[in-house]
Image (tube, grey):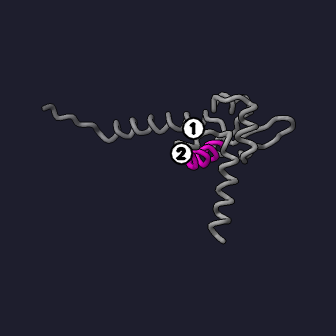
Amino acid sequence: MDDVRIDEKTVNNILEEAINKHVEELARQKYFLTYSELSKYLNISKPIIEDRLIKNGLKYYKVGCKYLFKKNEVDAFLDEITANMNIRNNDLKFFNKLQNNMEIFKIQEGS
């Protein structure tokens, strides 16, 4: 077997390149998404975003006549919704009903 040796300078250069590449990727990511960008990101239509997500509590920011969505808040919102889904309840259009039923159950459980 060959003995492979890499000096510290080479290792540091490789690490620096990898870190710089990752930083550039992060810098290219958008903080806010427009309605159109959100629609493309989630691969769903604008009416579905309004009907199934905004009505269920997805936060948005209105700047003039533009609606903006924080990408990290969208991801967290979807994580929360999907965490409450199961094999029998996996449709977003029923999420609001699911939330209301869970609140009723919590109230009944506390009585």
Q: Which residue is rendered at x = 70% and y = 53% of the image? A: 100
Q: Position of residue 21 (x, y in %)?
A: 50, 33
Question: Which picture quadrant has residue 18?
Answer: top left
Within the magenta stretch, is there residue 57? Answer: no
Give me the residue at 65% from left, 49% from top.
98
Is 103 or 34 nearer to us in this picture?
103
Q: Quadrant of the N terminus?
A: top left
x then y, percent, for residue 99: 67, 52
> Quadrant where the C terminus lies?
bottom right
Per the image, the residue denoted by label 1 is 26
Dominant SS of magenta comes to: helix
Amino acid at circle 1:
Leu
17 with respect to 80 (left or right): left
Please tell me how crowded label 2 is: few (under 14), some (14-19), or many (20+) other residues with Cα within 10 Å.
few
Frontmost residue, 8 versus 24: 24
Q: Which residue is mark 2?
A: 86
Judged left or right of residue 63, residue 48 is: left
The stretch of residues the image draws in magenta is 74-85
